[in-house]
Every structure is written in C-alpha cells, then in structure tokens.
Amino acid sequence: MLNKPQKAIPLFDCKTTQEVIGQQKFLDAFKTILDHGGYCQGPETRELDTALANYAGSKYCATNGSGTDALTLTLMAWGIGAGDAVFVSSFTFVASAECVTINGATPIFIDSDPNTFNMDVKDLERAIAEVKAEGKLTPKVIIPVDIFGSPCDYDEIMNIAKKYNLKVLADSCQSFGSVYKGKRAGSIADATATSFYPTKPLGGYGDGGAAFTNSEEDNELIKSCRVHGMSPQDHYDNIRIGMTGRMNSFQAAVLLQKLTVFDDELVKRAKVASRYDNELDSYFGKQKILDNCKSAYALYTITCEDRDELMSYLKERGIPCGAYYPRPVNTQTAYAKWNTRSLPVCEKLSKTVLSIPMTPYLDDEQLDYVIGCMNEFATNKKNKAA
Ligand SMILES: *Cc1c(COP(=O)(O)O)cnc(C)c1O
C-alpha cells in the first residue's frame, strides 16, 4: 500500500476558504446585518444580484433561496404548467426535473452523451419529434444540465430551440464560473439557474441560488414570483401565483465574501483536474470537456467498469469518493409515470461513474496519493486480464 498523506483527504472542502478570507470578515458582515435588521432580502442580496450579474455577464440576476427555487421560479415566470412538455437531462440531480413536475408540466427525459455526460442533442431532437407526433403535449422548454460543472453544447441546443420555438433554461447549478466559448454560465441560455449549496463551486454556508436572464420582463416576473406573485406597485395585491423563494441576507453576505476568492479557486480546481487528466491511467474513462470551454469542476468524475470495486478500494485507503448519480431521475420512484423513454447511455453512466476528491486546496502530497492508488487499481486489473 502507498503511504497515506498526513492530512486527511476530503471529497469536498467547504471550510478552508474561511481561513483564506479570514473568518473575521464573515463575522463583521453578520454584525452589520444584525444591526440593520434586514434579514430577508436585505441590502446584501441586492448587492449580490449586481455582483453576480456582472460576474456572469448577464443583464439581470435574481438571488433565490436555492437552486431549486431558481429553476422553479423561472418556469413559473414563463407560465409553464399542465399540458406543457419540458425536455430535461435524466443524468442529473432530481431538482432538474422536480421544477417541471412542481409546476404541473410533464418532464420528457433525454439520454446522455457518453463522452460529455451532458444532454445528447440527437436524442433531444428525437424526443421533440415523438412529443409532436403524439400531439398530446405542447413542447415548451429545454433544460440542459452542465453536469459536474462542464458546459453543454449550447450552440447545438440553442439551434434546436430556435427550430422548434422552445425556450432554454440552463441548469447551471453545478457550473457557476464555467465558460462556454467565451461566455460565462448565466449569459448563454434564455435563462440560467445556479445553486450556492455549500458543495457547489461557489458555495455558501447554507442554501442559496440565483436566476439569470437578459430579459427585463422575465427578471421582474421571477422577482415577483419569489415573493408570492406580489405586485410591484401594491405589496398587498398578489397578481399571480408564486412562492417563497428569497435569499436571506446572511447567505448573501457569505457569498459576497466568497466571490472575492472565487476566480483563484477556479484556477486551483482546474490545476487539480489537469493533474488527473494527465496522470490517471487510461483504464479510466474521463469526462470530455468541449473545445474552447472551461468546466467549473464541481466534481471530477471518471468512468470505470468495476466502479463499485474501485469505490471500496479507494475508501479502504482513506480516499472519499461518490457515485453521482447511481439512479437516473427517470428510474426514481416518484418519477415512474414519466419513465417513458429508453435511456441506455444514462443507465450505463449511473453504473460506471465515480467522483473523486476535487477541492481547490488539495496539495501535491494528497494528489500523488489519490492518483497513485487509482493507478495501482488499474495496474492490478490490467495484470489480471493479461
Ligand atoms: C444542486 C443542484 C440543483 C439544486 O440546487 P439546490 O440549491 O440544492 O436546490 C439542481 N440541479 C443540479 C444539477 C444540482 O446539482
């Protein structure tokens, strides 16, 4: 067995940033909120709206209580509901599809590309044709998911959307900070949702999310829906159905601090990924990042035919890892009635993917060890097969 590094290896690291920024900065910001008393959607959230819109290169940003809120509120603002078909990746976290069902619309699950693990655009077109031929639902929205932080093929997806007159809501909950051909996540699709759950690339210390758009009208609708459909003129008149989807000021204060080191952390994540890309044995499949694109590396995910065995092998050696996602959304109990299409790539991925430690602060000793153990596993397998 290889020598274990002194420092434990985390799968995610939400804490080190506090030392990098200095914990006092957070405490000072919290004290300001305790003093001014605007706890829900206070001045910090408005400052964050602007900072995030500027960062993403989007005209508008509305902060929300979570990534799920951002997805749900955007569909609500677009008036998506019963009788509407929404095309969504199945190889994702459940919230990508939940925002559809919660609004009463029908999710149509799309298969994955075996290389990028993102929405397969050929299968997307096939699904649109199927829904049109059946004639029961109206195709309305495509929800591509930037899985593990890697941007989808937006040129292709936006072309398909244009051809069939659909809107695109990018689920960039894992990919804030990613770049698609010079454009940052948040500025590419008709609207984009992101999440600031602690383990996401820009993670808060609690739940948070944001919805981005270049449309002033959509932004106003999202902002109204996140406070129960309130009229901007008369706060006691709710002019549409909404929900509670606000961000609290404490979370906004955390994120304003974390934004100051975010670019540096993205560079550090990319360095970790580049070591894995270059040094991991070719026995493992690697997620393809599209040309001229940058992943935000929410996770670094490989594929391996003996995934479960590799997972035990790594855990025995003190290396945390996780299978994201072991069940595609279409196969989950609550989604059984929408499990209408065969998604072979998605099914295969759910049995072979493994996410390995990815944090900006992994040092060389830790990375040497992770890579060493992975490659040892690969060598043993190849020797046995020979
Ligand atoms: C995390 C995540 C969400 C939901 O975000 P929350 O902030 O946890 O509500 C949605 N979609 C994807 C792909 C995610 O990874």
Image (cartoon, helix red, strand yellow):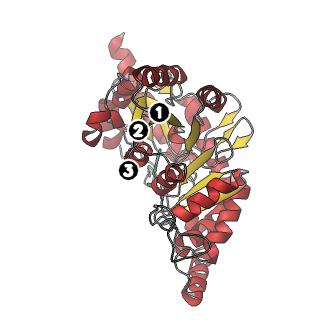
Question: Can residue 126 be seen in this snapshot?
Answer: yes
x, y (%) of residue 345?
Answer: 41, 22
- Residue 82 vs 61, above or below: the answer is above
* The quarter of the displayed image where residue 232 is located: bottom right
Looking at the picture, tell me which residue is in the foreground, 260 or 210: 210
Q: Position of 289 compared to 292: left or right?
A: left
Badge 3 vs badge 2, beta-carbon distance below 8 Å: no
Q: CA distance from mark 2 to mark 1?
A: 6 Å
Badge 2 vs badge 1, beta-carbon distance below 8 Å: yes
Q: Quadrant of the C terminus?
A: top left
- Residue 126 vs 238, above or below: the answer is above
x, y (%) of residue 68?
Answer: 45, 53
Mark 3, residue position: 102
- Image depth: mark 3 or mark 2 in front: 2
Q: Check disc 2: other Cα within 10 Å, few if <14, some if 14-19, many if 20+.
A: some
Mark 2, residue position: 83
Q: Which mark is residue 138?
A: 1
